[in-house]
Image (cartoon, rainbow, N blue to C red):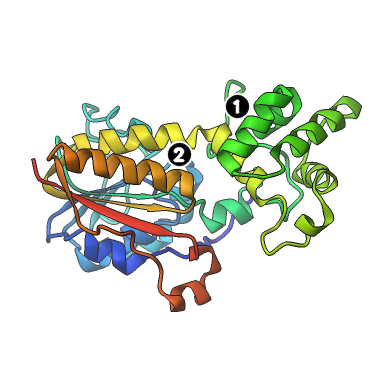
């Protein structure tokens, strides 16, 4: 894995912090810690806050140590997928936890928390520096797993493109990537792997290029974008994790506590919107913003990856 300083720019930072309506001693779950941008800003504004920072990629915690060295809030790092955020609630407290330093161990999880953040975007650091094949702009092994050190049992994009049936490939590329040329790309993958293994991102990009028409390859969005998105979602079961994370997050949220979710594509946003509407109808929550909050023009100009972001916030009322 490539190491180095984090380059990620946190999207909708101020909108999230303001929308959570935090207090001096709020307990916050940052369910997608990433570059630590939201957590660091909370620490600056609310030094007595307690943060439980969750990330599936253990490497993110090490890279953010410097960012938290001079901050006073109590932050604890937990290396899991946010779909399992309840699984460590009864763990014994870690003896090594300290303010501003954090720990990678188990914690004495509070029964309820005051705020939850889910920022569902792939961090710029994972995209650029992970070495796991998230970016079609770099020639890397086909992994696309969020885990820093995947086990042999973990699904990878290498396994998907080299072993899954053509119909299954077409279904996920269309269903998760909303790719109009999904069938052609799936056929191209199967034909290519019959000749030799598809090992790297550039191998896959070449196949996608040869499977799509010329006008598509010259479009505004890179022709491999949707296929790579689809494979990443499939490998990490991102939509299933989101559904679980939303339900479990709401279950550990205090009355009057708030949950903020940032999505980056329509499939995620549809799940969040549906969940929020259902819970509002049940009388469990109220929606803080009826329509999603989007980045300002200034933010998009300074960070192009923010262009598709949507923020939805709810408050638990019972």
**Front-lying residue, 15 or 287:** 287
Classify mark 2: residues with Cα within 10 Å, few (<14), some (14-19) or many (20+): many
Residue under numbered circle 2: 56
Label 1 residue SS: loop
Q: Nearer the viewer, mark 2 or mark 1?
A: 1
> Could you tell me if residue 144 is visible in this image?
no
How far across and down, in percent of the image, does residue 317 sit? 9, 45
Rendered residue at 39%/38% (across/down): 242
- What x and y, as percent, mark residue 200? 77, 41
Residue at 12% of width from left, 40% of height from top?
A: 283
> Mark 1 packing: few (<14 Cα in 10 Å), some, or many (20+)?
some
Q: Secondary structure at mark 2?
A: loop
Q: Quadrant of the N terminus?
A: top right
Residue 24 in sight: yes
**First reached walking from the N terminus: tag 2 or tag 1:** 2
Q: Quadrant of residue 197?
A: top right
In space, the residues marked 2 and 1 are separated at their CA atoms by 15 Å
Position in image of residue 7 (x %, y %): 53, 63
Label ID, residue 172:
none
The image shows residue 19 at horizontal and vertical percentages of 23, 62
Image quarter for residue 22?
bottom left
Residue at 53% across, 37% down: 147
Q: Quadrant of residue 170?
A: top right
Query: Disc 1 marks which residue?
Result: 155
* Farthest-out residue, right: 195
């Amino acid at each position: 894995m490539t190491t180095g300083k984090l380059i990620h720019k946190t999207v909708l930072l101020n909108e999230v912090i303001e929308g959570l309506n935090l207090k001096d001693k709020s307990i916050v779950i940052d369910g997608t810690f990433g570059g630590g941008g939201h957590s660091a800003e909370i620490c600056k504004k609310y030094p007595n806050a307690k943060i439980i920072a969750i990330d599936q990629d253990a490497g993110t915690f090490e890279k953010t140590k410097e960012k938290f060295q001079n901050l006073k809030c109590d932050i604890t790092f937990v290396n899991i997928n946010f779909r399992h955020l309840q699984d460590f609630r009864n763990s014994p407290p870690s003896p090594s936890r300290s303010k501003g330093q954090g720990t990678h161990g188990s914690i004495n999880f509070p029964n309820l928390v005051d705020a939850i953040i889910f920022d569902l975007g792939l961090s710029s650091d994972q995209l650029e520096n992970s070495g796991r094949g998230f970016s079609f702009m770099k020639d890397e092994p086909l992994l696309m797993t969020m885990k820093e050190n995947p086990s042999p049992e973990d699904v990878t994009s290498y396994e998907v493109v080299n072993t899954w049936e053509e119909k299954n490939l077409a279904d996920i590329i269309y269903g998760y990537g909303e790719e109009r040329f999904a069938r052609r790309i799936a056929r191209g993958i199967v034909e290519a792997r019959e000749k030799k293994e598809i090992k790297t991102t550039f191998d896959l990009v070449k196949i996608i290029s040869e499977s799509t028409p010329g006008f598509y390859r010259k479009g505004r969005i890179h022709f491999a974008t949707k296929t790579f998105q689809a494979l990443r979602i499939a490998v990490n079961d991102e939509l299933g994790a989101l559904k679980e994370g939303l339900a479990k997050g709401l279950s550990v949220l205090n009355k009057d506590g708030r949950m903020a979710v940032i999505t980056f594509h329509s499939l995620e946003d549809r799940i969040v919107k549906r969940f929020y509407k259902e819970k509002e109808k049940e009388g469990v929550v109220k929606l803080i913003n009826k329509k999603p909050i989007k980045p300002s023009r200034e933010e998009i100009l300074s960070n192009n990856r923010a262009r598709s972001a949507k923020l939805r916030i709810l408050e638990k009322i019972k």
